[in-house]
Image (tube, grey):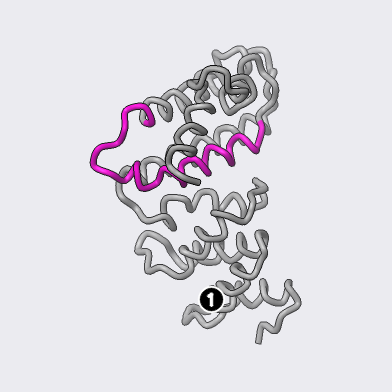
Amino acid sequence: MDVETSGRLLLAHAGEVPGDPRGEEGFLGSLRPYRGIREENFVEVMTALHGLRNVLRGDLVPRVYVGALWTLCDTARVEGLSSRSALQRDKLMSPADTERLSRWLRTIEVTVRFLLGGKPDGVAFFGVVRLVAERRVVATAEPWTQIACLVLEEEVDDLAPEDHVTAIQALSVLGGEGARGAVERAFKSSNSVVRAAAKAALRAWGLDGG
């Protein structure tokens, strides 16, 4: 997704694109009035961040994107998670959805912080990789297969072998030739924990895990 499309998508979910249906149905719009939280909105926000990743790593980040992110996260916390909000006070949002929204916001915030700090994609977007691995979100193959592959293939000081295992689990969920190729390469890892995870994934696909 190109920068312009990604930027517009982010702004729409923050309610800042007049006439866009996401103003009522998007990440913030679905909270007021409350229509239930929607996983596809979270995935779209993260996809927009991926499209804007190099912009957010830049020395001069456009104010409009910073403002939209601040609005999206702060408003969602105040209106969705605060104990004084109508959604919590009147018990309109279930405890399970409260936990989901909290985790989504934490993932967005950490991703933005890492991008602003110049972290590589495999680190910045690892939160989504974890959610896919745990089957907490249903994401399409791209760009998340690419991100999970980066976790496995890049020399990333910020990630541990356990994080590589999480990436393998995410790839086993996402599937596809790219995912299988990355897991096959991970099977040659010098780390026994990573090899074992790759072996399990390959066998689940009906492939020879050695």
Where residue 183 sits: x, y (%)? 58, 73
Q: Which residues are magenta?
A: 38-65
In the image, residue 84 lies in the stretch drawn in magenta = no
Q: Position of residue 86 (x, y in %)?
A: 61, 12
Principal secondary structure, stretch drawn in magenta: helix
Q: Is residue 59 magenta?
A: yes
Q: Quadrant of the C terminus?
A: bottom right
Q: Residue at x 66, y 29 (%)?
A: 37
Position of 61 relative to 126 (above/below): above
The residue tagged 1 is 186
Residue sitting at 37 percent across and 69 percent down? 155
- Packing grade of label 1 (10 A; few <14, some 14-19, many >=20) is many
Spot occupied by residue 172 in the image (x, y as percentages of width and height): 66, 65
- SS class of the residue under badge 1? helix
Residue 19 point in image, percent of width and height: 57, 18
- Frontmost residue, 33 versus 105: 33
> Does 52 sit above or below residue 176?
above
Q: What is the quadrant of residue 43 in the picture?
A: top right
Residue with the most extreme right position: 206
Q: Which residue type carries mark 1? A: Ala
Residue displayed at 43% across by 41% down: 3
**Residue nearest the observer in this picture, 116 or 187:** 116
In this view, the residue farthest toward the bottom is 210
